[in-house]
Amino acid sequence: MASPGGGSLGLLLWLLLFQPRLGGAQGESAPSPPSPSPSGGGREDRRESVSRVGGSSATPVPQEAAASPQVAAVTPVDPGSYRAAAIPQPAARSLFPAGCGHRSMRIVGGIPAPERKWPWQVSLQIKDKHTCGGSLIASRWVLTAAHCIFGHVEYTVKMGDIHVNHTSRMAIQVPVRDIVVHKYYNPVGSIENDIALILLEFPVNFSSHIRPVCLPEKMFMVEAGMECWVTGWGKRKETDKPEDAPEQLQEAKLNIVRYEECNRALKEQMESGSDLVKKGAVCAYSSRGKDTCQRGVLSNPRQP
């Protein structure tokens, strides 16, 4: 369904991470000490590797991410399902940078987003060309989709700018130190475990243009029908060609739908007899034709 160069999950990224269950919405965030200043970004020991969650990895773990919520808080229960483990409150508070989620003033059918509205939105780039979106979750960590990762390709992360083809004075380009792909991600077949973590070469300073999105501290449920936002640089119309993708960040308001409804609609649209969306996926819909991938109006938010 979605392909590199599509939209971003924005606020939906953390929903996928903690395996939401449709029923009721609950969750909160807590402050933590300010993020460290950039260390300079030396690249002498640079490594571009793709590791598996739960396996051995040479990825250096910064102090702020020693108990990374993506690794420590989410455990597989069965294929296509996750359980969010409880995190002690002192430890949970240390996971979230101060000021996360604050803002100052592959999406289809979106509208241009104002500057500083989505300060956690980043552009994952290859040779200065946008390939996928992502969300900043800490001073050295970015959350993206596993299908955006292509082996040992040299990646950089651009942030602080709503434009992908030019650089504002507030934008920065950060080299990638390492990448961790979900242990059970499989690019073939149904959409499951499509998630990856990117470790930046050095920590970034937060500002009105660069700020991490908040992650939930504990288990919560999301009610079908609730409104949410998706952001990215994806197609504005289903018939657009790749070269017609917008240069400015787009945003779209969607509604959460049950995965059964999402799966049924996608199977009909793609004329498939197989289940394309498994239980545990987060699907969003808009009657105006906006969504998070480049096919259909119902989709699993696998495109960050």
Image (cartoon, rainbow, N blue to C red):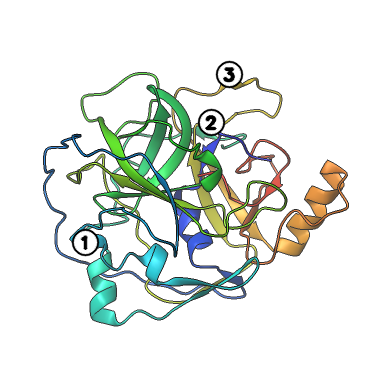
Q: Is residue 172 above or below residue 127?
A: below
Task: Classify residue 158 as left or right of residue 50.
Answer: left
Tell which circle, 1 or 3, labels the residue nearer the N-terminal end.
1
Residue 5: mark in rendering: 2
Q: Is residue 158 above or below residue 260?
A: above
Task: Classify residue 71 as left or right of residue 99.
Answer: right
Q: What residue does disc 1 label?
A: 64
Amino acid type at circle 3 is Asp
Secondary structure beneath disc 3?
helix
* Residue 166 position within the rendered picture, expressed as x and y whole percent measured from the top left: 34, 18
Amino acid type at circle 2 is Gly
**Dot 2, crowdedness within 10 Å: few (<14), some or many (≥20)?**
many
Examine the rendering and report whether any part of residue 216 can be seen: no
* Residue 66 position within the rendered picture, expressed as x and y whole percent measured from the top left: 25, 65
In the picture, residue 96 is in which quadrant? bottom left
Q: Nearer the viewer, mark 2 or mark 1?
A: 1
Amino acid type at circle 1 is Glu
Secondary structure beneath disc 2?
loop
Tell which circle, 2 or 1, labels the residue nearer the N-terminal end.
2
* Residue 125 position within the rendered picture, expressed as x and y whole percent measured from the top left: 41, 30
Q: What residue does disc 3 label?
A: 244
Secondary structure beneath disc 1?
helix
In the picture, residue 137 is in which quadrant? bottom left
Q: CA distance from mark 3 to mark 2?
A: 11 Å
Q: Is residue 121 above or below residue 28?
A: above
Is there CB contact under 8 Å for labels 1 and 3?
no
Return the residue nearer the eye: 22 or 65: 65
